[in-house]
Amino acid sequence: MMKDNSVEDLLMAHAAGRLAPPVDFVVAMHLAMTNGPNVWHAAAYGAAGGAMLADLEPTPMMRSSIDAVFRKIESEPEEVEVPVTREFGNSELPEPLRKRIGLPLDDLPWREFSGVAEYDLGSEDDGYRTRLIRLRAGCGVPKHTHSGQEVTLVLRGVFWDGDERYRQGDLAFADSDVDHRPMADKDGDCICLAVTDAPIRLSGRFTRLLNPILRL
Amino acid sequence: MRMVVEPTPPSITAMSDVAQVLSTFADDLVAVGRRHDREAFCRVFEYFGPRIKTYLRKLGLDDDGAEDLTQDVMVTIWRRAGQYDPEKAAASTWVYAIARNKRIDLFRRTRTADADLTDPSLEPPSPTTGFEAVATEQMETKVREAIEQLPESQSELLRVFYFEDKTHVTIAEETGLPLGTVKSRLRLAMNKLRALVGNELA
């Protein structure tokens, strides 16, 4: 299911700002939740952006620009702050994700069938679908039928894909070419945040909207 | 209060000079965060403003659009400077993270049908990504050196990858390189960057 290169590609694409917003969000939440090596990898890729930005040739700004900046500071409403911190106190989730979901995980109106429950977080115009998935302990997802790519972040519990174990904060990347059947660990329910590029049922002239998660 | 902006200092080429100059911006950001120091902010603006503008132009914005969005990035820098921790983040990585977020926001807005691109209340801004919370100055220095040492065939691609909104396929077409070569060179660059960092959270 998970190809190591694909997750690294995802991290670098994230640092480079190349991911579509719904995917970018999931990766950012992963980086806030995990303590594993991905944090350091992403930091290196991010530092590359910083280093290269600082070395760019400057394009002259208008002389009045700094004044315009101060005017905007004074006149524009303060944007809604959603800083990501790596400590979330009593919450099990980072703040931006908590806000996005809106309710504690256990209070969501899950739609369950055979041990698998879903809660939709919305689809973007370009076909990315974001949802929460809850697998009851020991239950698995039926074999996928969508033909796209999927990025999954474990929010609670553990799931297995064959011999690979994914626990809270882990990120998984799946290509539907590979037959996979994720199963929650028998010791507890597993809740994940998943974003998929759903199949697009649009005609040729909208093909520029066909944006696989890893744009190739 | 009318501020006079001095012209940008001559471009710096020596590695140690770059690191030294950039470390002064860490102090400036702290000054902005702590006491709204306008002179410190102007120094950050003078250096990074024109470079953020270049970044946004490369992404395809026209001069007015790039100018406008650069100003928005600077406003965010002012507002978030209170969160800047020089122990945890290099100034340019922190600034880059904000510019990167604006890019994502821009992408989000232009994908929504009938979006009013000038309406700031349309969407909450993207959360800060978090990588800048651990990308220290030391790491950025190492990364800069590593990029300097990359063969130009890789560093050029890396710059295009970060700063231009082009798919691998488009990059291959424009450079005349096979798609596989583009991907493998980027991967080589990525591997070298990754090799610089340890696997443990210190």
Image (tube, coloured by chain):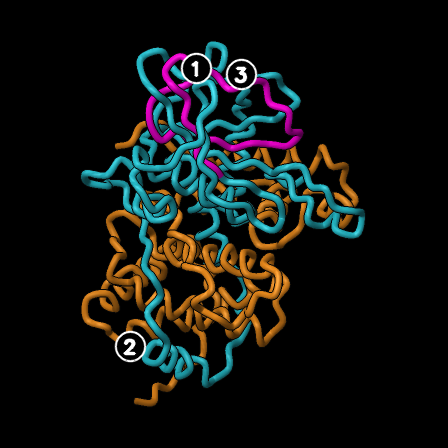
Residue B82 vs residue B98: left or right?
A: left
Tag count in the figure?
3
Q: Secondary structure at mark 3?
A: loop
Q: Confirm whether circles 3 and 2 share one chain.
A: no
Which residue sits at x=68%, y=49%?
Answer: A209
Q: Is residue A153 magenta?
A: yes
Residue B164 vs residue B29: left or right?
A: right
Q: Which residues are magenta?
A: A131-160
Q: Which mark is residue A181?
A: 3
The foreground one among B123 and B70 is: B123
| x and y percentages locating residue A182 in the rendered image | 49, 18
Q: Is residue B54 magenta?
A: no
Chain identity for the colour cyan used in the image: A
Q: How far apart are labels 3 and 1 at the CA level? A: 10 Å
Q: How far apart are labels 3 and 2 at the CA level? A: 58 Å
Residue bearing mark 1: A139
Quadrant of the rendered structure where residue A67 is? bottom left
Callout 2: 10 Å neighbours few (<14), some, many (20+)? some
The foreground one among A40 and B167 is: B167
| x and y percentages locating residue B75 in the rendered image | 37, 70
